[in-house]
Image (cartoon, coloured by chain):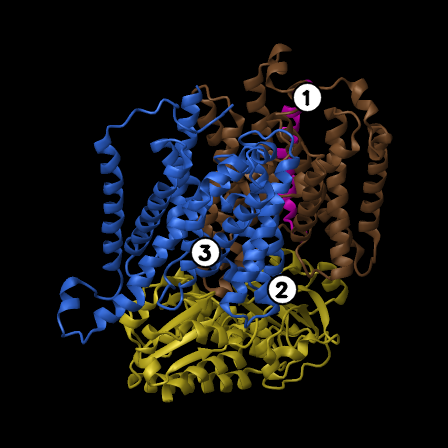
Chain colours: A yellow, B blue, C brown
């Protein structure tokens, strides 16, 4: 069990512990953006605090394997080369990683321990689906669990991005990107003030689940400041089964839709068909053409990566700005 | 060993007045429940809002678009599933089977999945057609296996059906997992009326019509259940009757699964309750099965709408709890009878 | 039900081609096959650090052999006491209970907490819950003179439907990204078994085996059906209860170790009966276990070397197991 208070302590620890302990104590192994620590066998290490403890990670590791698509997205947008990725149905933004030039290190869930051991990586990044392989992978190489804390996803995402920046000597680049995201969030909050209410729903085989604060989709309310149209008190990572009457009654100004059936066919197509009915069409959102179809891949496949969060936040902000 | 679930065969000779009173009461109960169902939901629909003009006819619109369709869908589903369960039980000559325990529902679900994967944009009608074809195949396979199982003990029959359903389910899971459709599959697995609106349930009228056909042909199924020779001696076409039954049951299951999702236990519990109440005269029991089925689904759906208002609990989940309790009661009661 | 009560001489005359080899011969052949598979599994494509790879593979092999043993023994014994060859212990609602438990935990504490909860805690919780559930089921149904095993089964099945109904609802509401993590738990996996749990599982299975060994002589009598067994002086009810408890421990341990495998037991038991010319537990049990080991080792090899971990092994086994079973049913060779 995780207690909520633990996170802030961890955060403080992480920043305190992120010291570069160079051999001989010389502090000149400075690794600012593009800081060049010569060769792979550089003795500089970074201590990383993560979801399952703390790990000594070599600074600027060259041979990086990641199971976490969010981290992959972050590294991809920082221009860091990743060498090993799982066999996965990569979303469009990461489609390049499906090619054979990357070592295949198992499936999204099952690490191929032998292939990983043979590849001798300098760093392995895991998260949610592979979290329980932490012990086994740690035997091979320094492993960090970059699962995002669902209780405070954005803070957690910022920490993780900063951590990755530290490891790869890209602190400045990460800081810039985070500042950009923050400004978009600020903008979204401004826009949200005059944008009225919003409701987040997910369509699944013709049925509707509404999400409130606290879920992955809840950040629309929590972080971007969109007022809740209906008092959906979803705690944690699940929604509530609702009827179309519920949507009509909530009468949101913006309806944010995630299409669960988008695995097949065009994203949003199936959802649009489900929502095209008299009750939904009577809402302000439909009248003003403010039904926003969120990209399924970026909202629940990729997760919290630098490029992806930017895309998520911008898509909502654009919708709010009208 | 359990032999029969039916009550003792000594039917009390009912006085004429009771014969009329009971059906009247049952019909009344269903009517009252239906009216209740019309006035339960998230939007404010009540006698006063319907009559007052202040709500510019919103209440009336909600009634027409959402409440009446939903109530009709519930009634049709309840009636049809009860009858389908009864027919299945007559054909297999076993009190413990219903479409969801002989692989019909699982097969229909596999059908939906296949269409969804191959032609994602297929219209609802195509999905239903394919689901029905798969349902027929699955049910036919069950009856085929049944003929090969030497000892048709009361409890072996449903076991074969459940295993078959499990196997078809495993195949479905396999493909759903590959295409990341497991969560969508869950929506079909749990019957739910929350998505019912005018224009989204009309296929259920077909199901109602099929139930009527089942009623008209009910006696033939009783005969067919007695076996091939017996049926042929009475001058009936055995294969024809069985084929008709297969198509009826599978079509009902497929249409219900596609429009609202799987509704467990109903076809099992309702006919058994009716047989306990009025005995095993098929002709007489079909209307009762229809009434009781409709009533039970109504009660469960109203409960599902109220327990966590304004959110819903799918009728499938409520029914699986109510159905499990009832079924266990029936089982244990029959055990006491045997003891 | 219909145990094969024909005298052995009559049965021997009805041999199918498969049965022309004696059961002893089959055990020998299968043992060699298992040994060959184990060797292949341990040595194929060896690369990298042997000190790391070999223990890793040994771990997987041990997990598979344990599961094959638990599933094979429990299925055959279960079918013996129920006098029915269509049943498996998992149909009693075990799998559904396991899935409900995982879903419920994911729903309440989130998958992240669930995944990092510590394998030991989860394992103990699952085993205790599953054994407790089956024990309650037998207790409740055997009290009050209802001797019907079938009733126990049907009740188990009903509970299964109930558990599934609740799980489906929770799964539908769960956040899609969480659901992805959760769904991994529904499929058995041998790739990542916690080595500390292997020891505990092995000990538990050993304890259940010793309990079974002590009543081994009654198995063949039980297979003759209740009436005959009672006439032959076996305390039927006690023995059946003992066997059922042993079965539930075996199934619970195997499910908690790798995840649910529904038709796997059915597959190995059915094929074992096909191979055995004489229905004696001393032959059927080892053959079932060996077949299970072959299926798992072979399956995992194929999966790793050909599909590159693309599909969970259990789904493939379910798929094949189901198809083989239906074929056997249609042939009328499963009674």
From the viewer's perspective, tell me whether residue A243 is left or right of residue B181: left
Chain letter for mark 2, please. A
Q: What segment is highlighted magenta in the picture? A: C190-217
The C terminus of chain C - image quarter: top right
Mark 3 against mark 1, which lies toward the viewer? Answer: 3
Q: Furthest-front residue in view?
A: B235
| Label 1 sits on residue | C216
Q: Secondary structure at mark 3?
A: helix
* Disc 3: host chain: B
Q: Residues within 10 Å of mark 1 (few under 14, many from 20)?
A: some
x 62%, y 46%: residue: B141
Q: Tell me how far mark 3 sits from mark 1, CA to CA.
A: 50 Å
Is residue C95 in view?
yes
Q: Crowding at label 3, few (<14), some or many (≥20) Cα neighbours within 10 Å?
A: many
User: Based on the displayed image, in which of its 4 quarters is residue A37 positioned?
Assistant: bottom right
Q: Which mark is residue B256?
A: 3
* Residue for point 31% across, 68% down: B65
Q: Which residue is mark 2?
A: A108
Q: CA distance from mark 2 to mark 1?
A: 45 Å
User: Eyeballing the image, is A173 above or below C61?
Assistant: below
**Residue C116 seen in the current view:** no
Tell me the element at label 1. helix
């Amino acid at each position: 069990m995780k207690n909520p208070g633990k996170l802030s302590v961890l955060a403080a620890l992480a920043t305190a512990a992120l010291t570069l302990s160079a051999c001989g104590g010389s502090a000149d192994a400075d690794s600012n953006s593009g800081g060049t620590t010569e060769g792979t066998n550089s003795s500089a290490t970074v201590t990383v605090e993560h979801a399952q403890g703390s790990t000594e990670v070599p600074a600027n590791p060259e041979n990086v394997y990641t199971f976490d698509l969010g981290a992959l997205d972050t590294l991809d947008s920082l221009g860091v080369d990743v060498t090993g990725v799982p066999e996965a149905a990569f979303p469009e933004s990461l489609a390049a990683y499906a090619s054979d030039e990357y070592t295949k290190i198992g499936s999204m869930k099952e690490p191929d321990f032998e292939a990983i051991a043979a590849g001798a990586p300098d760093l392995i990044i895991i998260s949610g689906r592979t979290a329980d392989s932490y012990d086994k992978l740690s035997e091979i190489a320094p492993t960090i669990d970059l699962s995002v804390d669902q209780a405070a996803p954005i803070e957690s995402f910022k920490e993780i991005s900063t951590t990755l920046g530290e490891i790869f000597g890209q602190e400045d680049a990460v800081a810039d990107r985070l500042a950009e995201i923050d400004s978009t969030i600020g903008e979204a909050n401004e826009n949200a003030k005059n944008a009225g209410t919003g409701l987040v729903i997910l369509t699944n085989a013709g049925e509707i689940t509404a999400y409130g604060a606290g879920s992955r989709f809840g950040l629309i309310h929590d972080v971007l400041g969109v007022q809740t149209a209906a008092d959906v008190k979803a705690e944690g990572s699940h929604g509530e089964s609702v009827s179309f009457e519920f949507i009509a009654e909530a009468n949101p100004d913006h309806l944010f839709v995630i299409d669960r059936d988008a695995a097949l066919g065009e994203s949003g197509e199936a959802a649009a068909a489900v929502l095209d009915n008299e009750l939904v069409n009577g809402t302000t959102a439909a009248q003003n053409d403010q039904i926003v179809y969120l990209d399924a891949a970026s909202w629940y496949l990729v997760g919290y990566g630098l490029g992806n969060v930017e895309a998520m936040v911008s898509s909502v902000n654009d919708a709010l700005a009208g | 060993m359990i032999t029969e679930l039916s009550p003792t065969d000594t039917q009390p000779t009912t006085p004429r007045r009771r014969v009329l009173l009971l059906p009247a009461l049952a019909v009344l109960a269903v009517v009252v429940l239906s009216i209740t169902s019309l006035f339960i939901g998230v939007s404010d629909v009540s006698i006063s809002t319907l009559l007052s003009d202040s709500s510019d006819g919103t209440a009336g619109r909600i009634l027409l678009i959402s409440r009446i369709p939903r109530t009709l869908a519930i009634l049709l589903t309840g009636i049809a599933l009860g009858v389908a369960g009864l027919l299945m039980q007559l054909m297999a000559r076993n009190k413990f089977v219903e479409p969801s325990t002989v692989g019909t529902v699982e097969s229909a679900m596999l059908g939906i999945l296949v269409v969804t994967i191959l032609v994602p944009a297929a219209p609802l009608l195509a999905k239903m057609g394919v689901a029905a074809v798969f349902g027929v195949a699955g049910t036919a396979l069950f009856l085929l296996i049944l003929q090969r199982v030497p000892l048709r003990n009361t409890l072996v029959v449903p076991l074969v059906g459940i295993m078959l359903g499990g196997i078809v389910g495993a195949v479905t899971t396999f493909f759903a997992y590959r295409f990341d459709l497991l969560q969508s599959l869950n929506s079909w697995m749990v019957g739910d009326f929350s998505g019912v609106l005018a224009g989204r349930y009309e296929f259920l009228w077909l199901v109602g019509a099929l139930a009527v056909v089942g009623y008209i042909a009910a006696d033939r199924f009783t005969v067919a259940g007695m076996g091939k020779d017996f049926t042929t001696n009475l001058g009936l076409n055995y294969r024809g009757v069985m084929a008709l039954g297969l198509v009826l049951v599978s079509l009902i299951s497929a249409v219900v699964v596609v429009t609202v999702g799987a509704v467990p236990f109903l076809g099992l519990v309702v006919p058994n309750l009716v047989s306990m109440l009025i005995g095993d005269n098929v002709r007489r029991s079909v209307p009762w099965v229809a009434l009781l089925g409709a009533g039970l689904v109504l009660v469960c759906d109203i409960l599902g709408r109220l327990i966590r208002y304004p959110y819903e609990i799918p009728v499938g989940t409520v029914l699986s709890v109510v159905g499990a309790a009832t079924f266990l009661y029936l089982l244990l009661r029959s055990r006491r009878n045997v003891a | 039900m219909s145990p094969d009560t024909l005298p052995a001489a009559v049965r021997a005359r009805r041999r199918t081609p498969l049965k022309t080899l004696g059961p002893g011969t089959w055990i020998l052949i299968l043992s060699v096959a298992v040994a060959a598979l184990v060797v292949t599994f341990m040595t194929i494509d060896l690369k990298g650090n042997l000190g790391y790879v070999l223990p890793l593979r040994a771990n997987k092999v041990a997990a598979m052999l344990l599961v094959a043993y638990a599933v094979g023994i429990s299925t055959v014994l279960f079918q013996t006491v129920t006098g029915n060859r269509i049943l498996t212990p998992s149909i009693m609602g075990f799998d559904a209970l396991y899935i409900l438990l995982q879903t419920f935990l994911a729903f309440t504490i989130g998958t992240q907490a669930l995944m990092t909860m510590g394998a030991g805690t989860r394992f103990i919780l699952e085993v205790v819950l599953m054994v407790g559930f089956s024990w309650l089921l037998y207790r409740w149904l055997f009290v009050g003179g209802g001797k019907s095993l079938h009733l126990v089964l049907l009740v188990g099945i009903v509970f299964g439907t109930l558990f599934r109904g609740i799980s489906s609802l929770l799964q539908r509401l769960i956040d899609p990204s969480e659901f992805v993590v959760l769904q991994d738990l529904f499929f058995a996996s041998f790739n990542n078994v916690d080595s500390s749990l292997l020891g505990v599982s092995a000990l538990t299975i050993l304890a259940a085996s010793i309990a079974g060994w002590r009543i081994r002589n009654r198995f063949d009598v039980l297979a003759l059906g209740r009436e005959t067994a009672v006439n032959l002086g076996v305390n039927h009810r006690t023995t059946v209860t003992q066997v059922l408890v042993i079965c539930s421990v075996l199934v619970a341990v195997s499910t908690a170790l790798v995840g649910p495998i529904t038709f796997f037991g059915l597959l190995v038991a059915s094929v074992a009966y096909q191979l055995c010319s004489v229905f004696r537990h001393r032959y059927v049990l080892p053959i079932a276990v060996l077949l299970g080991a072959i299926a798992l080792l072979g399956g995992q090899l194929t999966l790793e070397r050909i599909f590159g971990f693309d599909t969970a092994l259990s789904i493939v086994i379910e798929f094949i197991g189901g198809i083989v079973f239906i074929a056997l049913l249609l042939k009328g060779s499963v009674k």
